[in-house]
Image (cartoon, rainbow, N blue to C red):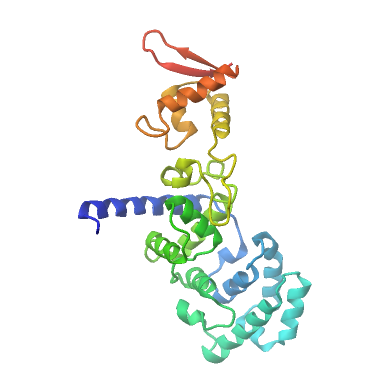
Amino acid sequence: MSDSPGEAHTHSQNIEQLQTALVSWYESDHRSFPWRDTDDPYAILVSEVMSQQTQLSRVVEPYRDFLDRWPTVGSLATDEQSAVVQFWSAHSLGYNNRAQYLHTAANQVIDEFNGEFPRDPDELESLMGVGPYTANAVASFAFNSGNAVIDTNVKRVLYRLFDVEDEDSVYAEQAQRLMPSNQSRVWNNAMMELGAVACQKQPRCDTAGCPWRGQCQAYRKGDFSAPDVQSQTAFEGSRRQMRGRVIATLGEYEELPLEKLGPRIRVDYANDGQYDREWLRNLVMDLADDGLVVIKTETKTGTDRVALR
């Protein structure tokens, strides 16, 4: 059954809210890497090939050394492949065939594309060693013309956010539906950043300030399993974590009424939701029974206030 006009409008509004929240979160603070400061497709391709199955922090120095030695696609193409492989090995980048692929791809750009990188992801895939992920990454970060980039981190984000099936076609559909038009550069950077620093295998929803907590199915349920996380995370979303949040919040505010404490413990706190006033009162009652907090009831208003003991 297709959506009614009203439902479609609601879905559109929700997606726009998700888009705005994520881009704002990313632009306010994100990790700094040298390849994020360039739109040179050659430099971006080098970074993407180097970072395959390698931690990004380990790539920074080799990336800079590589571009110092081969600053342009032409300089790489005209050098011996053995020199590139030796560089790769000396910098412990692993999988030396990636160095061979990169050298071959550089020669393809020179010979088949007259020294100009193709802008279209399908054409980029014709380069040696460049698959759909790398093609869309280069198209996005160099030309702002790529489709949604999908890696393990992005799959984890989508799986938890929407509680979707673990199917590549489903991820592709959801990722493309989420991406705002003509913003593939910032969007794909933001999605990968979210998965890398907030929606990790052991998620850091609150400490990393995930902008999607209020809409995330995993956050709501407290179940952070994912395709690459086979068992539910023990701490995230647990009652133990919520107790800790109460203590930390009261340490900052000293004393709060229940209604003001609730939203500071969970972003999805609501009087008509799963995490409501009764849920919160039971939580603080447990803490009171353990001698950690005091619940004070104002005589005139009947308002419950909570303070550290």
Q: Is residue 4 visible?
A: yes
Q: Position of residue 109 (x, y in %)?
A: 56, 86
Q: Position of residue 229 (x, y in %)?
A: 58, 53
Q: Is residue 24 visible?
A: no
Q: Position of residue 1 (x, y in %)?
A: 24, 58
Q: Is residue 308 above or below residue 276?
A: above
Quarter where residue 178 is shown:
bottom left
Q: Nearer the viewer, residue 104 or 27?
A: 104
Q: Is residue 194 left or right of residue 51?
A: left
Q: Quadrant of the C terminus?
A: top right
User: In the current view of this chain or complex, which residue is farthest to the front?
Assistant: 231
Q: Is residue 69 above or below residue 213?
A: below
User: In the current view of this chain or complex, which residue is farthest to the left?
Assistant: 5
**Number of numbered discs present?**
0
Q: Is residue 308 left or right of residue 211?
A: right
Q: Is residue 44 left or right of residue 212?
A: right
Residue at 62 percent of width and 70 percent of height? 47
User: In the current view of this chain or complex, which residue is farthest to the right?
Assistant: 90
Q: Position of residue 212 (x, y in %)?
A: 45, 47
Residue at 59 percent of width and 70 percent of height? 48
Q: Is residue 53 above or below residue 66?
A: above
